Image: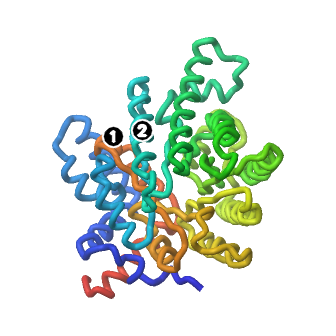
Amino acid sequence: MISFDNTEIAFQSKSNSDLNRAYWLFKLIGNPTMVKVGKWSTNTALNIGLPINGLIKKTIFKQFCGGETIQECAKTIANLGKFGIGTILDYSIEGKTKEEDFDATVDEIIATIHAAKNDPTIPFAVFKVTGIGRFDSLEKANNGTTQLTENDRLAFQLIVSRVDKICLAAFENGVPLFIDAEETWIQDAIDTIVRDMMRKYNKEKAIVYNTLQMYRHDRLAFLHAEIEIARVEGFHYGVKLVRGAYMEKERLRAAEKGYPSPIQPDKITCDNDFNQALELVVKNIDSMALCSGSHNEKSALILTDLMTKKQIEKSDKRIYVAQLLGMSDHISYNLAYEGYNVAKYVPYGPVKEVMPYLLRRADENTSVAGQTGRELSLIMTERKRRKLN
């Protein structure tokens, strides 16, 4: 059985200074008060123009990001590739509202697709629909296209055409493409767009992948229904399974607006649905493709066990696991060492533009029970092994 406790393999790509930086970062992230103070002071410093870019770039940015441009990510891509781990270039700017910014983001995502073409170390491309279109346009469309004004319809159609442009580039270059999941109140609209893209581009194999957040109690039933639609209509279904990134926001909005929370009642139910989804996809793998985007050791072991039982080769390109850069190296590197397909999400972009993403990462780490503690204990074990204490 694979062991995720082998820290020599887990941190083989890390220098002593990398390991020490990670140690202090995870110590800080494990402290909710420090995260709050750090968020406030970082935002304040950036907003008033203090020259802290260099400090951020050497610390939290270096831990969780590949660089400010695709070119700057080259070193990270090569370093991961050396250990059999792929890179998913994730252009992580958020909160734009101007059409010219959306168009520029489309061009950047297509540039990541071109970078991935014929490069086995970059197995996927990825984007968020809110990175290329207005949130309010998606929200209006989510509530039903019949109520839309002509302007609303045009705005939504513009988003769809941008998504199509990216999917076409992925199809033409043979690069599988993840479309990330977002908040429930825009996700129906995103699901509809992604399904249409799959109908168009997934006839021969999975190019376009939808993302399912399994902390939602309705996603397992949704997956069953999607598999049936794909079977009846004759296209391959690509899916990235994650637990999810908007849980606190979702609960808060449901409470404020007085509707039932879309979130699972507890972590056990979420884990069960995630693992059942893995089983369902592996069972139907002949017409599907899977990326298990998880930092959960048990889910990783369940997936390897399912592959063994179904006699699926470790290197079968239809099945990948993925983790975020700078996190869960004990899962990524140990699985890659055993010959499984592994990739890291490598966020990049200008420091100031990527800060909302980085601060959300810090928030998520403090809210996931045990995650930061596990990271820290493994780093401490490896520091001890290297006699760095």
Question: How much space separates mark 1 and mark 2, taking CA atoms?
Answer: 7 Å
**Count of marks overlaid on the render:** 2
Q: Position of residue 224 (x, y in %)?
A: 79, 52
Residue most toward the top?
150
Residue most toward the left?
51
The local crowd at label 1, few if under 14, some if 14 to 19, many if 20 or more residues have their Cα within 10 Å, is some
Q: Is residue 77 visible?
A: yes
Q: Nearer the viewer, residue 245 or 264?
A: 245
Q: Are marks 1 and 2 in contact (CB under 8 Å)?
A: yes
Viewport quadrant of the N terminus: bottom right
Q: Position of residue 267 (x, y in %)?
A: 64, 62
Q: Is residue 292 left or right of residue 97?
A: right
Indicate the amino acid at tag 1.
Glu
The local crowd at label 2, few if under 14, some if 14 to 19, many if 20 or more residues have their Cα within 10 Å, is some
Vertical arrangement, residue 336 with respect to residue 78, above or below? below
Identify which residue is drawn at 27% across, 52% down: 72
Q: Which SS class for mark 1?
A: helix
Name the N-terminal-most of marks 1 and 2. Answer: 2
Identify which residue is drawn at 41% across, 81% down: 9
Residue 94 circle label = 2
Q: Which SS class for mark 2?
A: loop
Q: Position of residue 363 (x, y in %)?
A: 44, 53
Residue 196 circle label = none
Viewport quadrant of the C terminus: bottom left
Q: Nearer the viewer, residue 384 or 155?
A: 155
Q: Nearer the viewer, residue 346 or 147?
A: 346
Q: Is residue 259 left or right of residue 49?
A: right
Indicate the amino acid at tag 2.
Glu
Residue 353 circle label = 1
